[in-house]
Image: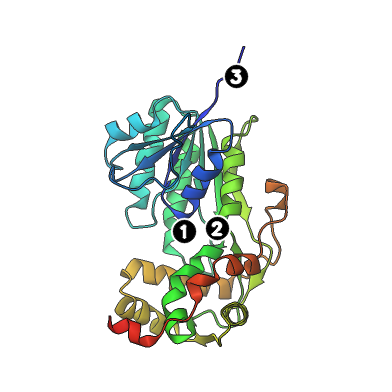
Amino acid sequence: MKKIKPTIVVFGCTGTVGKEVMRQLKDRDCMARGVLRNPERTYPVLIDSGSSNIAYVSADLNSKEQLEKACAGADALFLLTATSPNQVGYEINIIDAAKQSGIKRIVKLSAPIVQSSAHVEVSQWHSKIDDYLIQNIDEFCCLRPHSFMQNWERNTFTIQYFGKIYGALGNAKRNYVDCRDVATVAVNYLLATEQVKLRSVILAGPQAITNVEMAEKLSRITGRKIEYVDIKPGELFSQLTKKAKLPNWLANHIVELDDLAIKVPEPETDTVTGLILRKPRIMDEYLQEYRHLFKRKPLWKLLF
């Protein structure tokens, strides 16, 4: 008797990590169903013209009926929605739909548990969702990365045009992990044959890096001088809201993460080697691969 392939539902399939989860599931012995919030959205991983184990559905995250249809017949679910003040409500809706549809396992991309010496509002959102998940789903796994290497793509504008990195990190270090390695951990747990009940899986990359060290790495990879400019938290918040036009909650989140790294030292070594059965990618590999994103652009292009 042939083994029935498991069906994995992927929420957040168009995001940095979710897209990579879909890409890796495509090469595994399973069916992968990506959930799109907008039915017109371009598929993040293309469906093969012939037989494919990739499919997509669309669902409103506020619609119980649509979410239950998206989860129908599935065995496990990857939980991730875009970070926003609506995240708690959206992800609780998804957990409810998964439970109603009979899904037994959810692998959630969460956040580090923040000690009382620091405050990170987004981590509090994740904590509420984590608690609800654990109370309502038989099998669960909360993945807790610190920072993604791909988060540096938020800084491309000032690096490209001004050769500068702005932050309020001082000399503190941040631990970075490649989103592709995080996706590998998620896929392994989604497809695990043994029971999974893990409230906290800390995902740390191979080293912790200061912004000064990042400026040196970017200088080497771009062939120009990149400078880190350390500013006060209030000034960083003002730049992010007034110049970068970020919403207040997101600007505040970025400032809080710098403050967290100052108050609570981040890991210096990786925790994922044993989870992915190989060494994780290092920052220099990521920067080499994506160096085109940080290359110089002349200031006159800002006028056109």
Q: Which residue is mark 2?
A: 112
Separation of residues labelled 1 and 2 (CA atoms): 7 Å
Residue 63: image quadrant is top left
Which x, y percent locates residue 289?
58, 65
Separation of residues labelled 1 and 3 (CA atoms): 39 Å
Q: Are discs 1 and 3 less than 8 Å apart at CB? A: no
Secondary element type, mark 2: loop
* Amino acid tagged 1: Ser
User: Left or right: where does residue 7 sit relative to residue 42?
Assistant: right
Secondary element type, mark 3: loop
* Amino acid tagged 3: Lys
User: Which residue is depicted at the point 44% across and 86% down?
Assistant: 162
* Amino acid tagged 2: Pro
User: Left or right: where does residue 177 sit relative to residue 8?
Assistant: right
User: Left or right: where does residue 122 sit relative to residue 224?
Assistant: left
Residue 202: image quadrant is bottom right
Badge number at residue 265: none
| As drawn, 199 above or below 291 | above
User: Left or right: where does residue 4 sit relative to residue 94?
Assistant: right
Q: Which residue is mark 1?
A: 123
Residue 45: image quadrant is top left
| As drawn, 211 above or below 184 | below
Say which label, 1 or 3, has the lower sequence index. 3
Q: Are discs 2 and 3 less than 8 Å apart at CB? A: no
Secondary element type, mark 1: helix
User: Which residue is depicted at the point 41% across and 37% down?
Assistant: 95
Pointer 1: residues within 10 angstroms few (<14), some, or many (20+)? Answer: some
